[in-house]
Each structure stands twice: as C-alpha cells, then as structure tokens.
Amino acid sequence: MCGIAGFTGKERALPFLLQGLARLEYRGYDSAGITLADGTGLKTWKAKGRLKELEAIIDQENCSQTCGIGHTRWATHGVPSNLNAHPHTNADGTISLVHNGIIENYTALKEKLERLGYVFQSATDSEAVVHLLDYEYRQCGVMLEALEKTLGQLKGSWALCIVTAFEPDTIYTARKESPMVLGHNEAGSFCASDAPAMLAYTHQICLMDDGDMAVLRPDGVKLYDADGNEKPLVPVEIPYDLEAAQKGGYDSFMLKEIHEQPEAIRETLRGRIGAHELKLNELEAMAVDWTSLREIVFIACGTAYHAGIYASTLLRRLTPLYAHALPASEFRYAHPQIDEHTLVIAISQSGETADTIAAIKLAKKMHCPTLGVVNVLGSSIARLCDAVLYTCAGPEISVASTKAYTTQLVLLHLVDLKIAQLTGDPVDDLEDRLRELSQLPAAAEAALSLEDQMTSYAAYLKNQRDAYFIGRQLDYPSALEGALKLKEISYIHADAYYAGELKHGPIALIENGTIVIALATQPDVAAKTISNIQETIARGARVILVTNPDADATGFSHVVRLPKCDPELVSIPAAIVLQLFAYAAAKEKGRDIDKPRNLAKSVTVE
C-alpha cells in the first residue's frame, strides 16, 4: 500500500514522479501528492482521489524543477483528504516528506512536539516525523545527522523520502520494514517504494536494508547504515520490462494476468522437475535436521493464506508431520509453541506483507528455520528468511491476486513433495506426480477455455447481493479463494463453508434463487459433497457445480467440467475458472476491477 517516487537530476522531476506513481497505482491509494524543490523553495500539490485529480491541478503549473518527491496514500491514520495526503511539510515550508508505514509512538511524539510549540495540521502519524526532523535539524544544522537522530526516536515501520529548501537538489531516504529501492543513470538519481516506478529509467536497482539511510544527488547515490557509516551499493538486475506491466490488449490487468497463468506456471516449474527428479536445492541447502522436524507452519495473509491451507492439507497426506496454516496477523498472538523443530513457511506475493514479516521475526527469535515463498526478487521476506523460493509469476499489477496465487499452489506442491523426501517419507508415485505437474500449463490453458461459460453463469449474480461457495478437503481452500475473489472485485457478499458444515447453521441463509458455487473435485468425498449440494437445491438454491470431466452430474443444470487433472492438482484449474467467474461478475456490475475500493496490493502495515 502507498507508493513513493523521488527524483533529482538534470531533467525535470515531474515526469518521473507522475509516471512512477502511475506505475505504483496497483498498490492501492486514496489520495496523492507531490513536492518539487528548487532555489526558490518547496512547492507542494495534493489531491484526494485518483492520480488524475492531482495531474489536473499540476497541469496548470509550469514545473521546471529538477528535484522532487511524490506519494500515493492509503489511509491508516486520518480519513482520506487533501489535508491528510502526503507530502507533509514543516511550519515554515522548508522540509517536506512522504512516508509509508506506521509510526507506533506518534501520539507520544506529537505530545512532545506540541509542548515544544509545534502545531499539527493533519490527523496522520507521518506529520510527527516532519516536525521531529525539523526540531533535530534546528539543533545540529546537518540533515543526515538530523535524520539519524529522528529515526532513533521512532517506533514502528517506515519508508521515508525527504526534500528540503536547504539542499534543493538532494533527496534523503530511510527505511525500516517498508520497502525502498534506489537507482541512478545519466539523467539523475531516483528512488521508489517498488521497482516498476523506475523501469522506464533503469533495470539496475539497489535495495535498502532495514535501518539504512541514503542521500540522492544528481551525480550519484550514497548509502549509509543505521550508525551513519557509508556502505557499498549493490545493484540488482530487474528481469522484466515495462511491456510486462501493460494491459496487452486486455480490458484490465486482472484479465491479462488470468490469461498469463499457463506461462507463469510453466516458468515456476522450469528447472524444478525432471522425468525422475524433483529439484529444490534451496531446501536441501537449508541448515535443518529434517528428520527431527515435528511441525510445519504455513503463515500468510489473504489469498496467500488460502495457498497455505492448501499446502498444509496436502502435506498431512504426504507425511505424519503436524502441518497447519495460520493467518500471519494472528500468529504472534496465538502463543505458538514453536522451536528449532518447527519449519515456518511464509507465503507472500509482494514479499513486503507487514504481518507476515512480523511473524517471521518471531519465528526466528524462537529459533525456527524459515522458508519464504515470494514473487518479488530481493523483497524483505526474501532477505529475512533462511531460504527463499520464487514463484516466477512476473509483475502482478491488479490488486486482486490471480497468477501469484496459482503459482504459489504449484510451488508449494513441490515444496510438500520435497519435504516428504527430506523427512524420510518418500513418495512412491513420484514419477507419476512429476508427469502430472508437467501437464499443469496445458490444464491451465483448458481452464481458460471455459471463460464464456463462466461469464454466462456470472450473469446470475447481476441482481444478487450474496453468494455461497462450498467444498470439502482440497476443495475448501478453493472455495475460500473463490469467495474472496468475488467479494474483492464485485463487492458481492460471498462466504465459503466446508460443505458438511452447511447443515449446522449456514443453510438458514439459503432461499429461492440463492447462488451456490459447489466444488466437488475430490473423489473420496465427492458423493458426500453432492449430498450437501442437494440440501441447498431442496431450498431453492441455483447451484453451479464445479467438478471433474467424468463426474456424475445427473440432476444439475449448471455444470463446470474442469480439465482432467490429478485430484491433488485440480485446485489450480479450479482457481482459474473461479477467477474468471469473479471477473465477469465485477464487469457485469461495472466495478473498477484492477483497483477495488479500500484494498491495497502490498499491505505494509499491520
């Protein structure tokens, strides 16, 4: 959530800032702002709403400044408004900053600063930082030193980007538990909260570690650790380009990314499976006594949590280990009884999810080995965990996750198989499983061919306010994810239940015309699921049955037959058809599919 862009160089700063913030719109936001600096001082513009509102204001100005910072804000402290929008500026307009994250002790800082005579204009925690920085600068007169002293008084998380009237060609940045990347070319120096903001200018970026500060000037970038010691810049090559972040002729990024799933799955499998061998060297290289493991915990949030439920359910089939999934936001408060015999697997598309990062830190404190499953090279989770596996989904721009989810399922399936091998529970039918895995891209292609059918069924939701998803065993995480996708982008209330739990309460919600999406792909429980579905039909529900190509669907009017697939892998094509269903429902209702209200792509606050 929230996007940051900063530029100082030989060219006008505004074009970089506007294109950078536009590239970060996928992170979700409710206001935007920019500060530009030159020898005459600082000038700031802010606007509630979309970036186009800000652009309309600035369009009337002649902005030749070559240094500036910009921000798109997702409200945490204070309602969305021009006043609460970033950048925030000190009283005399000489220091301006933008901030991602949460300042946990801002109330105490605000009280201290008010006693010193500072007056606050907004309801944000970020304004406390600019006033504290102003105070420290007045004491020492050196901005880097003032920044270091300011950071020492903050508790929480931050990515800060600062410009001043004292050095109108210089940007100061700092980060802790919130991402910030740096870059430089012949045009100047720049920073951003995520790489897509800089891809039009460079594919070589430098990552900041927790506690780092950086000083950007037109001729270069200097990086410092938390103690103010200069450290080397280590460039990282970003392997994708701007074309990968465009819609490519599709109506939305989400639809484009749904259709990219066969290739994303193929890339995730590439080099991981052979005819007779499963290759996950990252796990084999971990300093883990695999035979002494007692427990595997999958931690994640939202869609990634559903992938964790899938992985834990599958792993319990493969090994006698106690495997379970927990929402990362609850992990720290669940009093987990974990130690060096517990492997913690953290799943995140962005690699910057704050709740998941906090959970990993607790796991490491309790001596657990940690494995990250992420999609973003060099992200915080990738660097924090003992080992990392990448899903190879490529950039995912739409807020609602699609290809990141299915590649998580694929990679976690491989992880489960490898864990079974390493812990002494070899998989007898490994070659058959590897062959089935190699056919997944084709199964994904076949699932995409059901788009017209899913569009026709989604029309049933046009005048509906509710929908219910049911399934058993591995169909249950599919039901959870299907319901989440529908409510995320269409705003239709959707719940998911274990099919067998319907009769224990939720069936009271079923009435004539209620839409029920029922998944019955697991052979060992399919008959029982069908029985549960019949209970809803008897009460007037309109049921959409999602099942296997050879399943008996006698008596059902609306049947989605998934491509032939191993029952333990069918969750991948099932996810794709449910994404198409949610997409069509949202389009039917005229929603902003790529940027649904109140949501953010990368949730970097707890």
Image (tube, rainbow, N blue to C red):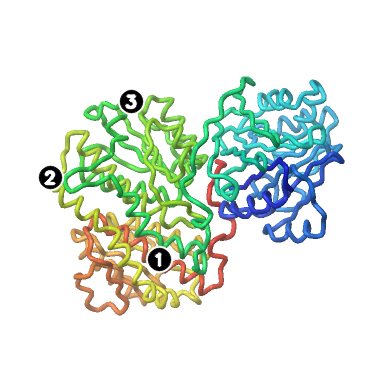
Where does the image place residue 254, in percent across and percent down from the top left? 48, 62
Q: Secondary structure at mark 1?
A: strand
**Helix, strand or loop at disc 2?**
loop
- Whether pointer 1 and pointer 2 mark residues with C-beta atoms closer than 8 Å, the reply is no
Q: Which residue is mark 1?
A: 468
Which residue carries the number 2 mark? 428
Mark closer to the observer (1, 2): 2
- Please say whether residue 345 is visible from this viewpoint: yes
Where is residue 341? Give x, y as percent. 30, 28
- Mark 1 vs mark 3, CA separation in Å: 41 Å
Inspect the image, locate mark 2, and give the three-letter code of the amino acid beneath it. Answer: Asp
Dot 1 amino acid type: Tyr
Q: Closer to the camera: disc 1 or disc 3?
A: 3
The image quarter containing residue 559 is bottom left
Residue 255 x %, y %: 46, 65
Question: Which dot marks residue 340?
Answer: 3
Q: Residue 17 or 32: which is nearer the viewer?
A: 17
Residue farthest along the front direction in this orientation:
186
In the rendered structure, the answer to whether residue 8 lies left or right of residue 438 reads right
What kind of residue is marked 3? Glu
Residue shown at the point (21%, 39%) measured from the top left:
420
Work out whether mark 1 precedes mark 2 in sequence or the reverse, and give the earlier one: 2
Classify mark 3: residues with Cα within 10 Å, few (<14), some (14-19) or many (20+): some
Q: CA distance from mark 1 to mark 2?
A: 38 Å
